[in-house]
Image (cartoon, helix red, strand yellow):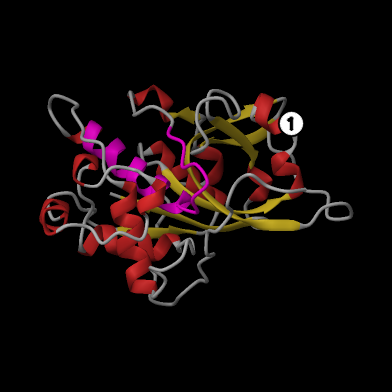
Amino acid sequence: MNSERQYLLKPDQVDSRDYIYMASGSNSEFKEIDLRSKDIPEIFDQLNLGACAIFSITELMMYWMKQNTPSHYYFYLSQLFLYYKTRETEGTIDWDSGISIRNGLRIAQQIGVCRESFFPYDISKYKVLPSREAEKDAADYKINDYHRIMTVTQLKSALSEGCPVVLGIEVWNSFEYDEVKNTGFVPLPDKTKESIIGYHAMLIMGWKKIYDKEYMIVRNSYGQNFGDNGYLYIPMDFIGRYVTDMWVAK
């Protein structure tokens, strides 16, 4: 199967220096939640650039900007800026390499992300050095901290506190089936018939039970025509099997 997308997320390995998110209760205590009602930005389309982790991080930052300002106002943040600055630290500015979520979050904390108007999303310019003005503007838009999530309980706890979670997954052939594109439901991979075609980052906005099976409600970056108006429903059983890493940040 020839993919029209780039699945270039770099999975993060657990590091003893990672801060781990602490759950506020047991798994059975947490109720279904859907943060899509928080009036967040529209679904974006990363196009054919391996910037999925960047979209997840900047969308998370815009979510918090929206929630934490009295007028619930937010600026569009520059995905291309964060993609360049993160690749710069990884030594890959000359090619569309993808990035790791951890490194993207680290740059969002240390350097920040400028507004979209300073560095618009034009995928032909992903190698262009951001301007000094963009660098200066980025300093006003940073995250404070970020923590790794390891378990279903930690995920549900973070969501119950109103915190979306950046998700990294293995992408198997079935992710590109028409059923996924048309309905948003991602099946568990059939390892006897499928293979891994890459890795992808998205943003978990909630979870719910459907026919007694738990699903993560996941915001993708393939535009509104992919999935359920841009959202996917990924089985909670992915965690511990096909999830590479999860992160919460504020």
Q: Which residue lies at the image location 33% right of the left edge and 45% below the top edge?
A: 58
Residue situated in front as seen by the camera: 128 or 223: 128
Q: Is residue 241 visible?
A: no
Residue 54 drawn at (x, y percent)? 39, 51
Tell me: 98 left or right of 40.
Answer: right
Main secondary structure found in the magenta portion? helix
Q: Which residue lies at the image location 47% right of the left edge and 29% below the top edge?
A: 33
- What segment carries the magenta color? 44-66
The residue carrying mark 1 is 178
Residue at disc 1, secondary structure: helix
Residue 189 drawn at (x, y percent)? 77, 48
154 magenta-colored: no
Which quadrant of the figure has residue 15?
bottom left
Tell me: 90 left or right of 215.
Answer: left
Can you say whether 205 is above or below 48 in the image? above
Q: Amino acid at mark 1?
A: Asp
Residue 153 drawn at (x, y percent)? 52, 49
- Taking the view exactly as shown, the residue that stands out farthest to the front is 124
Residue situated in front as seen by the camera: 166 or 82: 82
Residue 72 drawn at (x, y percent)? 19, 26
Q: Which residue lies at the image location 75% right of the left edge and 37% below the top edge?
A: 177
Can you say whether 54 is above or below 159 in the image? below
Mark 1 Cα shell of 10 Å, populated few (<14), some (14-19), many (≥20):
few
Can you say whether 42 is above or below 115 in the image? above
Can you say whether 131 is above or below 78 in the image? below
Residue situated in front as seen by the camera: 10 or 19: 10
Tell me: 173 left or right of 151.
Answer: right
Q: Is residue 122 visible?
A: yes
Tell me: 77 left or right of 18.
Answer: left
Q: Which residue lies at the image location 51% right of the left edge and 26% below the top edge?
A: 224
Residue situated in front as seen by the camera: 144 or 196: 196
